[in-house]
Every structure is written in C-alpha cells, then in structure tokens.
Amino acid sequence: MEEVERVVEIVKGLAHQPNVFYPTDEEIQEKAQEIGRRTEFGNFVFFTSVRSRSAGSTVYIGSPKVMQPRLNERQKEIVKNLPRTISLLSKYLRKAPLICVKRTMGDNPHFTPHCTMFVSVQRKDGFRLAYMWSKLMFNPTERRDPDFYLVCVPEWQEKDRQILVFPEVGITFVLGSDYLGEPKKGFLRMAMWEAKNRGMLGLHAGAKIIRARDKNGKIRRYSMLLFGLSGTGKTTHSCHRHGLTEEGEGVEIVQDDVIFLRKDGSALGPERGFFLKTDIEPVNQPLIYRAATKKNTILENVMIDHQGKVYFLDDTLTGNGRGVILRSDLGKENLSSTINLPPLDELDGLIIAFITRRNTVVPIVSKLTPEQGAAFFMLGESIETSAGDPRRAGESIRVVGTNPFIIGDEAEEGNWFYEFLKAHPQKIQCYLLNTGGVGEIIGKNTQGEKVVLQKVLRVQISEMASIIRGIARGMIKWQNDPYFGNQVPEKIEGVNLDKFNLSRFYSKDQIEAYVSQLKRERREYLQKFPNLNPDIVNAVS
C-alpha cells in the first residue's frame, strides 16, 4: 500500500528534523513529575484523559495477511480516511515539539528488538508517557534486531482518536490517547508479530519458576505459564508464592504479561517492569502491594486524597487504575535471576494454566489433555462483569490465547501451540483454573434489565493458591468429570471442594442446561476457524 511506504518515509525522517529533541532520562523524569502528585510512599501518581486501550479504534494496515477480517464502523472510517490522516500527520510532525526515547526489549542473545518512541510534548503528558514507558524497557544496547518505531501524539483530536499499526514495517501511531497501555502494548504487539515470523509464539501470559516438594520429598522445578484476560487474576498469581514454604520450595517470578515461547519450551521475556492493575490489598497480594508502595513505582489514575494517602481499592475515577512497578521491587528472594525461562530439558516440566472467570458450572480446576489444552488456548474465555458492561453481565467473552494483540491468522497460533504440546507429552501439564466461582443465576427484572438472582460463591485467592500448590507438589488425586470430559480433583489440601458442589446451587436440569449451553458455545466458537486442526475442535465435543 502507498500509505505503508509513506509512513516509513515519515518515521525514518523524524530523527533528522530540528523539532526532535533527545532529553536525558533525568530531564524526562523532572518534566514529567511537574504534572504528578507525590504520594505518601514518596512515589508519584498521574492522571490521564484516556484510561483504557482504544481497541475499537485500532486498525492493522498492510498486506492481506495482517488486515483484520472484521472491522467495526469506526475502524472502517479510519481506513477510509487513512490517506488524509497520514497527510495531516506528516505536516504536524514537522512542526510539533517531539522527544525521542530509545530502549531495548528483552535481555537474551536471540531476540532483542530496538524500540524507538517519538512522543509529542505539546502537553507535558508527553514527558509522562516517555518517563513511564522507559521504566518498562531496558537501556539501549548495541543489538538492534529488529527495529520498532512508535509515534505518540496525545493531543490529537479526541473525536479522531485512532491507533494505526503497520506490523510489516514495525511502525505504530498512537493518536489522541495519553494512556500508557497504548505504547506499551504497541511495541509488544509488533514484537509478537515478528516473533511469530521467526518461529516463536508471542503469548499474553505470565511466567514463573516453581520449586515444590513432591510426595516422595524431592524438590521439583517447573516453569509455569499463566494465561488470562484482564481481571481474571493472571498478574495476581504470576506474583504469588502459593504457600510453598517448605525447605527448598519457592517461586521465581519471571514476567507478568508477555513472553516469546520457543519450540524447546524456553521463553524470552521482554520487560524489566510490570504495568499492573492496582486493585490490590496487602493480605492476599503481598508481593504486588509491597512493590506498589516503593519509591520507584509510578501510579496512574489511582485515587489519592489531599494529604497524599493512596486508596488502591477506590475505583471512583476508574476500575483500571495502574502502576509501573520495577520487577526488582518484588524482592530479590522472589525473582528469577533472568527474565527468560529455560528450555524444558533443564526442568522437571512445564505447568500451563488457563485462567478463566466463570460463575456458573465450570469446575474451579480441571486437568486437560493436550487437545483440550489447545482448545482452551483458542477459547481464551471468561465472562463480562457488571463492572465492565452491565448490559452483558454474565455473558461469555472469548479471545484467542487471551491475547487481544494477535496479528494474522489466529488458527495458525492455535495449531502451533497444539504441536508444541504434542511434542512434549511427558513434560507439559495443562489446567483450567476458574477464579470466578459457581452458583450464579442471571435473570431479568420487570423492566427487562439483567439482574443477579443468585450470587456466585467465589473462589478466594488463598484457595486458588492452594490449588496451584497442590498441582506443583503433585498431591492432587484426579477423577473424571461427568460434564466436560476432563478431570477434576477428588481432594485438595486447603480447599473445601464440597462447598463448590453444583448440586448445592442448581437442580439436575439446571446443571445440564448450563453445561449443554456452554459446550455448544465452545464448539460453535471453534468452528469459526476453518484452518484449525479438527482435533482441537473435537476436544470440546
């Protein structure tokens, strides 16, 4: 496309323009903090105009293999107006004051993209974006393979907000958003596309190492991947000890968001900082809470009073309060010495957990076959909550790989993942973890509005920690599940399984109706992918 060639020309020319400045990290920090507020912890909190990603205004542009198959009306409008937008942007970028920040993604000998961000500083929040993003990545190195560029113009007209992604040339434009999640995910999205082209699979998943004592008293060392959509507990359990306190046991936190999986089971991490949701408290999330109160942490849209006191659980401003937390602030004793996972031949195995949040009949933990594991990778399912969209509360939502940043054929990624599972049958265990609960019934009131008729019995963080501990220790005895064709536990230390028994909440007919509906939804969803291996589709039948 002509527009692709034009954006390459625009971006490559920016470095030589007189309106582009290269401030030091100290200068960026000083300018950014002028618009922040110092908290009781000595760190800073900032407030943005946009408080979540603009997924509905994001378009991928290039050859047919990267274009989105389905566009909403706003995305169609963006594509239609693309030539005009590029023309306006070209003129604007020659006039506006811009700063340039360079960083390296990753710390390994295989894949370390060189990332260059140009951000407009017409408003000081441009400095804040540069300040926060630079904390997530590594200082620039001599390794520059490949090159990614992102241009951020926060002051672009709000009504014309758009995210333009040109994956095949490694360029993204963020126009009209001052939310840090856009540049962060913008670079990671481009990296996941390039990783796939190099035979890896970019995963939206947390990663850690677990050391656990098995039933014979031997310490086993596993890598663990935790998939999950926003709000399901991916970060919470990526940064949790799970009560592994016996001698020799413990966890080594690696990454919380994205990794690049290789066919030998090793994985490359991209970041030195975590961009975490801050709906946290110290009892069940002690590691995250402690890190969030460190001086290095940078908070975004978190409630603070006139005296600087922070209220992490106050969602008056947004349910998406965030914080940039340095990985090192999680405590050296809880960290892996590297942000990468070793290959499977150096470990006792790999534990893969697909975290869902369902509230009716899904067991709180299920053990999966490789086919079922690949199916749940493709399903990437959870539910919409009342806090997210009251009109759709309780409805299923599904995102392949729990990864809303996939570029290209999603079935290709599911098939890659399935082949990976089959290649290591003795080393890989797959589980579905339900961090929601059971027992909920959604109905309608006299006005036709959806209401909760029967509340869900929720799985507590401590209970899920016990489940993961039992898996790691190999202490759970499994039995066949009569409803979904996988396996469920007979007993788990630290969890009263009887209280989650479906017969306590539903009649037999209700259980069968919920199960039948969910299995039908899953099957119909997987059948939408014509290139998907049929063994994956049949795994939910």
Image (tube, grey):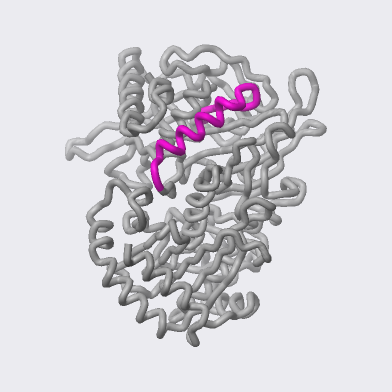
Visible in this render: residue 140?
A: yes
**Horizontal and vertical percent for residue 152?**
44, 70
Quadrant of image for the C terminus: top left
Q: Which of 117 and 434 is in front in this view?
A: 117
Residue at the extreme left of the image, as rendered = 447
Q: Say above or below: 43 vs 218.
A: below
Q: Say above or below: 335 vs 378.
A: below
**Horizontal and vertical percent for residue 513?**
30, 19
Residue at (27% x, 61% y) in the render: 79
Residue at (59% x, 77% y) in the render: 28
Residue at (50% x, 47% y) in the render: 197
Is residue 135 on the magenta stretch? no
Name the quadrant containing residue 8: bottom left
Q: What stretch is highlighted in magenta?
A: 408-433
Q: Nearer the viewer, residue 31 or 66?
A: 66
Quadrant of image for the N terminus: bottom left
Is residue 421 on the magenta stretch? yes
